[in-house]
Amino acid sequence: MENSSLRPVARQANLTIEELPTELVVYDHLRNSMHCLNRSTSFVWRLCDGQTTIEQIGARLPEVDLPAHLDIVRQALKTLDKAHLLVGKPQFAESGLPTRRQLVHRLGLAAGSAAALLPAIASATAPTPTMAKSGDKDKKPKKPKKNGQDD
Amino acid sequence: MAVRNSSSNYAILSEGLRVGFRSSGTELIPRLSSVFPPGSIQTDFANLDFVYSLDEEPGRKSYTAYFKSRALIRRATLSAALDSIASDVQHTVATYSRGNLFLHAGVIGWRGRAVLFPGRTCTGKSTLVHALIRAGAIYFSDEFALVDASGNVHPFARPLSLRSLKGRSTVCPDEEGLKVAPGPCRAGVIIATQYKPSGAWCPSHLSQGQATLELLRNTVAVRSDPGRAIRYTGKLASSAIAIRSPRGDSEVAAPLLLETLDRFLN
């Protein structure tokens, strides 16, 4: 059961954050992982200050050209939680959360623009120097994982 | 105490690092010069950050190479021993560089801008770079992009190391009359590409953040200095167009890729 006054908190500890014009690149020192937060995810994350409710965050989504829909906020929080970028785990029922494809259909977004607008995080593990040096030809570099896409 | 370079000791300064080389035989020092990273300059054998050694086993014509006290290769031919030192020196300088940030990438120059192909060893960068410079591009490197704080890309023009079914071969661009970059320039395009047997060239754009992430995935020292890594790669990505595409054979991909670059850079 969701707490309707959920006030998520963005993690700050042990992170290096680089602000780009519309995105954020985050390095997690604890996990040696790297993330690229797209525009809408960056927007939601910045509003996770422990004071702002998810309803208030949702009401501001038109500032990033998205409808004021609570499921978009939940989708963003789900991807942020998966990337370990929130303090604590947001308490909402993921079972009721639509998939990305369902959300695109529900919101009436064109498929191409949805990919750019809906919350998404691209993640990768930071390589060690040895990983790059080994040159094992059977090892393929991992493609960045994209959170927020359909399972 | 500073020791002058002697017939068995030699030191270089590379990217702010002082790297020393010792050998058991006086005739080996000139051969060691082949392993120095491009852009290295001679310095005193003193206050060294790292030391490599090359020992010849008496009467056996075999060699053992050491990094500090760790053997890189034992009882090998001279060529194999020198190759192992060369590879390790480049990797050490890339990892601990106090100057430029090292990214694993093939780099060419085209229409006055640097074009980067980030990717780790054995992803086909050298083959692609070789095809492109034979088609008229300027050679920066087949292994490392050196990025400074302003986002400029510096050449690291080592001999290309090409792999084929017959084994590995080395190509010196200047010996083939190919153009080598004389100095740094701004990045123009970042291309995330990987060889696939049936790969078709069909580029799609990457955002600045996605491009930065792609560069970070191939940054040698990202774990030891993530702040600098993110700043430098973010700066580089801010001045460049970034695309991703699979590709097929280099001979087929090269002209298609240059057509794409002409559209972006003209």
Image (tube, coloured by chain):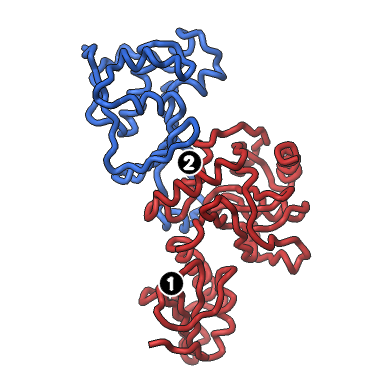
Chain colours: A blue, B red
Q: Is residue A102 visible?
A: no
* Residue A16 position (above or below residue B136): above
Q: Crowdedness of circle 1 by 10 Å Cα count: few (<14), some, many (20+)? A: some
Q: Residue at the location (45% across, 46% down)?
A: B230
Q: Is residue A74 left or right of residue B173?
A: left
Disc marking residue B72: 1
Residue type at mark 2 is: Leu
What kind of element bears circle 1? Answer: strand
Occupied quadrant, residue B238: top right
Q: Which residue is at the front of the view, B255 or B50?
A: B50
Q: Chain of mark 2?
A: B
Q: Which residue is at the front of the view, B38 or B22?
A: B38
User: Circle 2 sits on which residue?
Assistant: B213
Q: Earlier in the sequence, mark 2 or mark 1?
A: 1
Q: Crowdedness of circle 2 by 10 Å Cα count: few (<14), some, many (20+)? A: many
Q: Position of residue B25 (x, y in %)?
A: 51, 90
Q: Residue at the location (54% across, 75% down)?
A: B82
Q: CA distance from mark 2 to mark 1?
A: 32 Å
Label 1 near label 2: C-beta < 8 Å? Answer: no
